[in-house]
């Protein structure tokens, strides 16, 4: 029986996450006994490092099962400060750090604490699917910046040309989901300086911070001078870095006033991340040698998969894919395939699913119809099997192509 539930306007204007929907499709088909290859999910296929699990157990044994401060327990905020100081030479205080239930909540807190209805928010295309939905929830306006002319790498000039009289915020993600592109450090500085000159704030999603392949450069905006950083909120996450997606913990680094506003908001929503998980993350950051060794091992495997996968994808008829410098996604241009059989990239994704039992994510929710996002955060066996199915579905390019 229909209840005609009166969904709020804020929520009804939003779209459900297409990436989570694709992952759910893969789970459902697998439960039905289908031989599905899931290339949709942005989740490391590695297990959380054993020493981090042990730290969580240690936290439980210490009785860390109670409420903590909304912004996170002091050992964690202090550990973030110390880790960034030692690793990057960044200088900020624990009062500028707030723990959140995953990087996604950190992004949501930051935007909701800043934006008013009618504000303009600059978002480079292609974008992570959640960025415009957060803006929509805040009743602000997404102003998209097309970056195809610069091969999906945002530039300061593009930002400057997109600024409006009502621009309040720029949201930028590097290394990028979905494209895997990395904005060079010097260009990122220019981008942020361009915004600061106009009094515009910048929200940098750095959840793939450590997943940049040489010669790609790891860069965090937390290292910027304080007068510039006053306009910046860094959203970090343990989810990708340490393969802790299900642990749901992230953090933000922002000026004290912005941090207090985010903490106030979180005090009425999630309260704080799980206490013993905070402890485990604090200990992991303090044990930097073990943590960076674990990250380095994962990064090396992602790079091996990338180096094998991209040439294989480019050998498929109708596929075109640039070499990503970071994250763990291949963003495949399938516009050559559009015509009689396929009208949109969603049709291509449907063909992959129905014809090859491969779940991939259509580019349209990322602001890039004509592209398909493929995650290589899966085993080499899955990638090899997927390439074989792609060959059977679409064929391969001729040697002269």
Image (cartoon, rainbow, N blue to C red):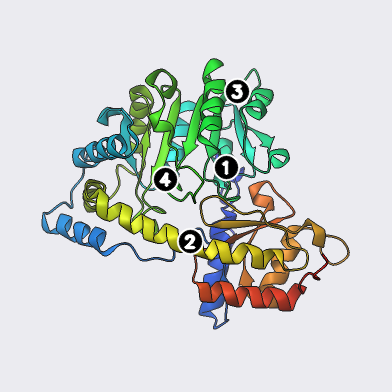
Residue that carries the numbered disc 2 in the rendered image: 302
The structure residue drawn at horizontal position 44% and vertical position 32%, both measured from the top left corner, is 221
Left or right: residue 286 versus residue 41 is left
Residue of label 1: 133
Relative depth, front residue between 364 and 189: 189
On the image, the x and y values in percent for residue 19 come to: 56, 57
Q: Dot 2: within a 10 Å radius of its alpha carbon, few (fewer than 14), some, or many (20 or more) residues? A: many
According to the picture, the residue beneath numbered tag 3 turns out to be 167
The Cα atoms of the two marked residues, 2 and 3, are separated by 37 Å
Question: Which numbered disc flags the more N-terminal residue, 2 or 4?
Answer: 4
Frontmost residue, 282 versus 117: 282
- Select label 3 or label 1 by which is in front: 3
Viewer-side label of 2, 3: 2
Q: Secondary structure at mark 1?
A: helix
Cα distance between the residues tagged 2 and 4: 21 Å
> At numbered mark 2, what does the secondary structure look like: helix, strand or loop?
helix
Q: x, y (%) of residue 371?
A: 70, 55
Disc 4 from disc 1: Cα separation: 15 Å
């Amino acid at each position: 029986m229909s209840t005609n539930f009166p969904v709020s306007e804020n929520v009804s204007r939003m779209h459900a996450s297409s990436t989570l929907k694709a992952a759910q499709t893969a789970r459902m088909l697998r439960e039905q006994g289908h031989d599905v290859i899931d290339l949709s999910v942005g989740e490391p296929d590695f297990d959380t490092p054993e020493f981090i699990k042990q730290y969580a157990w240690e936290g439980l044994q210490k009785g860390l099962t109670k409420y903590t401060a909304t912004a996170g327990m002091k050992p964690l905020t202090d550990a973030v400060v110390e880790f960034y100081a030692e690793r990057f030479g960044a200088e900020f205080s624990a009062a500028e750090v707030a723990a959140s239930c995953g990087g996604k909540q950190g992004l949501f807190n930051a935007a909701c604490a800043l934006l008013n209805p009618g504000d303009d928010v600059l978002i480079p295309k292609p974008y992570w699917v959640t960025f415009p939905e957060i803006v929509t929830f805040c009743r602000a306006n997404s102003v998209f910046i097309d970056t195809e002319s610069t091969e999906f790498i945002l530039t300061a000039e593009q930002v400057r040309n997109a600024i409006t009289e009502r621009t309040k915020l720029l949201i930028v993600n590097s290394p990028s989901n979905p494209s895997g592109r990395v904005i060079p450090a010097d260009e990122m500085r220019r981008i942020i300086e361009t915004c600061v000159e106009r009094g515009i704030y910048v929200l940098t999603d750095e959840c793939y911070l450590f997943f940049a392949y040489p010669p790609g450069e790891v860069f965090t905006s937390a290292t910027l001078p304080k007068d510039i950083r006053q306009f910046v909120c860094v959203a970090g996450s343990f989810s990708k870095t340490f393969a802790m997606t299900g642990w749901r913990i992230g953090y933000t680094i922002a000026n004290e006033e912005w941090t207090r506003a985010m903490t106030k908001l979180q005090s009425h929503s999630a309260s704080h991340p799980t206490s013993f998980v905070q402890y485990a993350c604090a200990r992991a950051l303090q044990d930097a040698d073990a943590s960076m060794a674990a990250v380095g091992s994962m990064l090396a495997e992602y790079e091996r998969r990338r180096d094998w996968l991209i040439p294989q994808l480019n050998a498929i008829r109708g596929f075109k894919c640039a070499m990503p410098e970071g994250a763990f996604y291949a963003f495949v241009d399938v516009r050559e395939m559009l015509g009689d059989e396929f009208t949109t990239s969603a049709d291509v994704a449907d063909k992959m699913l129905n014809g090859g039992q491969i779940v991939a994510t259509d580019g349209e929710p990322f602001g890039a119809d004509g592209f398909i996002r493929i995650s290589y955060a899966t085993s080499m066996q899955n990638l090899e099997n997927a390439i074989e199915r792609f060959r059977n579905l679409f064929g391969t390019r001729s040697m002269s192509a």
